[in-house]
Amino acid sequence: MTTPDRRDGRSGAPTGDRSPLNWLLLLPIAIPLLPPLFNAVEPRLFGIPLFYWLQLAFIVLGVTTTTLVHRATRRNR
């Protein structure tokens, strides 16, 4: 008799992914928390102050990082 390893009750190996690439997912969290990045009004991009276009850049960073980690760590189906 086997004991279930997962919450859904199925038996088998745990589904945890221990890839070191998962550490890259901390970048989109940690980088926006650095105050020196926001401590300016200039440079402006198309008339938009630094704070606002930097927020958009952080979104792009998050999406890009998540996509790269997902593609690098997914299992073959």
Image (cartoon, grey):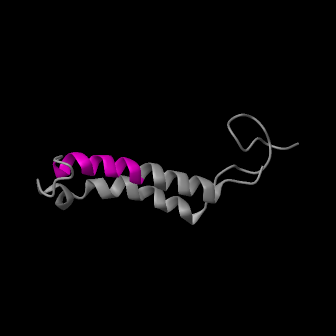
Residue 50 inside the magenta-drawn segment: yes
Q: Which residues are magenta?
A: 49-61
Instruction: Pick whichever, 72 or 1, lies toward us.
Output: 72
Residue in the image at 42% along x and 57% along y = 26
Q: Position of residue 74 (x, y in %)?
A: 67, 53
Q: Quadrant of residue 71?
A: bottom right
x, y percent for residue 36 = 17, 61
Question: Residue at position x 54%, y 52% from top?
Answer: 67
Image x and y of residue 53, in percent: 25, 48
Spot the residue most to the front: 46
Q: Which residue in the rendered view is the most extreme toward the bottom?
A: 20
Side (left or right) of 24 relative to 18? left
In the figure, is residue 23 to the left or right of 76?
A: left
Q: Please identify the quarter of the rendering in which residue 40 is found.
A: bottom left
- In front of the other: 9 or 52: 52
Residue at the image position 50 percent from the left and 51 percent from the top: 66
Instruction: Spot the residue most to the top.
Output: 8
Q: Position of residue 27 (x, y in %)?
A: 40, 59
The secondary structure that most of the magenta stretch takes on is: helix
State the residue in front, 17 or 21. 21
